[in-house]
Image: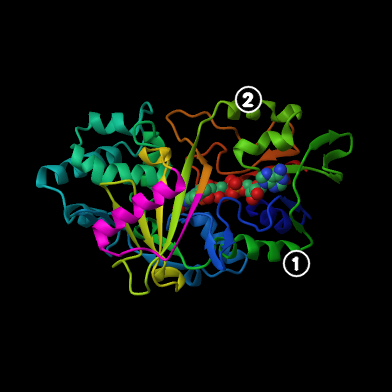
Amino acid sequence: MAAAVALVDAGLTPTVFEAGPVLGGRARRIDIDGRQIDNGQHLLIGAYTELLALMCQVGVDPAAAFLRTPLDLRVLPDFHLRCARLPAPLHLAAGLLGVRGLSWPERWALIRAVRIAQTAKWQLAADLPVGAWLAAQRQPTSLVESFWRPLTVAALNTPLETASTQVLFNVLRDSLGGARPASDLLFPILDFSALFPDAAATYIQARGGQVQLGATVRGVTKTEAGWLVNDAQFDGVVCALPPHRLDMALAGVAAAEPALTLLAAWDFQPIVTIYLQYADHVALPQPMVGLADGLSQWVFDRGHTHATPGLIAVVLSARGAHSSLNQNELTAAVVKELQQHFSWGTPSWTRVISEKRATFACTPNLSRPANATSDPSLWLAGDYTASDYPATLEGAVRSGLAAARGIIAAI
Ligand SMILES: Cc1cc2nc3c(=O)[nH]c(=O)nc-3n(C[C@H](O)[C@H](O)[C@H](O)COP(=O)(O)OP(=O)(O)OC[C@H]3O[C@@H](n4cnc5c(N)ncnc54)[C@H](O)[C@@H]3O)c2cc1C
């Protein structure tokens, strides 16, 4: 959708083929049991500048779309890091000095690690797993469990033992290491289709483009005149399928072969979101709280954001101990953990949404396909293309805009 917005802005008339019944892909609205929820709880940060700019462009006011707070990471039982409302870098310095739940040696270890990364301008000589880098920085186990592990798995959707330190640094550079608003947390108060893609579709259609829902691309073929997508003729193609589906459209297209070969070797990581409806009075003191001592990783209170009191979303990112449990076992385990921490009782409604290939596994030195292919009228877009970022909404938007710039120049 980002690419299509840029294409209509350049005076072209793109057609978007979307296989699903709603727009948004891995960040979309779903209707279940009469409730409107998202396929997975998402969190954005202030550093998502391109997505925020694009939302404004298509008429969605970020001030009305998000609950925006300064960075506030509370991880139970007792870790709490809060950035002060001060200009950078004082916001971070004050946050690190004031962090709760750490002994002084642990606090200094955290400050030392952040300083080392900052001094190196968030650039490693050679990438390595986050766990190995933390061990080299002599980060105490309790600090790793209460801060680094939840942060890494939330940012990269990859276990700390195998996650790329360089990509984590890139995220920290643009958030904690940036201006103070860059590290703000943005909790969506709209559903994910309304947040950007629905408005983008209206914008695209008003400018001569088309958006087709339920339109699965079954084949893309190069012809003398350009490209055939299913049976329709086009001058160029931006392929924005998810990485594990790329071959569905591009198998047999010579220019896509190098990308398909790279992607065939990739590992993907799941994300499970468990929605639980408790009594109306159930609430967290803030929209999101982490749990360091069980299966549940981040607990979101959608009463803060979606006017749905008592509706809680628990996020379990990446593969882990929870992966061997079936949905009933997982729900029971999560309900038990929430009961232990908050005494919320039994939920009246639950729903497990499991995205098996939520993101690519963001491992060190991962070779990612470029936007460009060897054919100047075929471009790739999506969160997986080569960039500084892990699989994120901002990465996907930047990739879409880059692909659009490339194909506009080419055709
Ligand atoms: C549960 C979950 C939680 C997440 N949490 C966060 C978060 O908190 N913050 C964050 O920044 N990111 C998060 N992400 C990642 C983020 O959602 C993705 O990085 C982003 O949505 C990827 O966008 P994309 O356009 O690259 O791919 P997709 O969103 O996958 O879009 C690809 C589209 O192609 C369509 N398609 C597939 N095959 C065909 C076909 N043959 N023909 C036509 N259309 C087809 C799909 O239906 C889909 O709409 C999360 C992801 C998940 C799954």
Q: Residue at x 37, y 52 (%)?
A: 332
Q: In this view, does 75 lie to the left or right of 247?
A: left
Q: Which residue is drawn at 28% across and 54% down?
A: 89
Secondary structure state at the residue bearing disc 1: helix
Looking at the picture, tell me which residue is in the foreground, 411 or 264: 264
Expressed as whole percent of the image width and height from the top left, the position of residue 286 reads 31, 66
Please tell me whether residue 276 is drawn above or below residue 373 in the rendered image.
below
Q: Is 135 left, or right, of 396 in this rendering?
A: left
Q: Quadrant of the C terminus?
A: top right
Highlighted range, magenta: 326-353
In the displayed structure image, the side of residue 362 where residue 344 appears, left or right: left
For the N terminus, which image quadrant?
Answer: bottom right
Q: Which is nearer the N-term, disc 1 or disc 2? A: 1
Q: What residue type is labelled 1?
A: Ala
Q: Is residue 371 visible?
A: no
Q: Mark 2 points at which residue?
A: 261
- In reply to whether residue 328 is colored magenta, the answer given is yes
Does the magenta run of residues contain 337?
Answer: yes
Q: Where is residue 104 drawn, in percent x and y?
A: 10, 47
Q: According to the image, label 1 marks what residue?
A: 206
Q: Quadrant of residue 152?
A: top left
Q: What residue type is labelled 2?
A: Thr
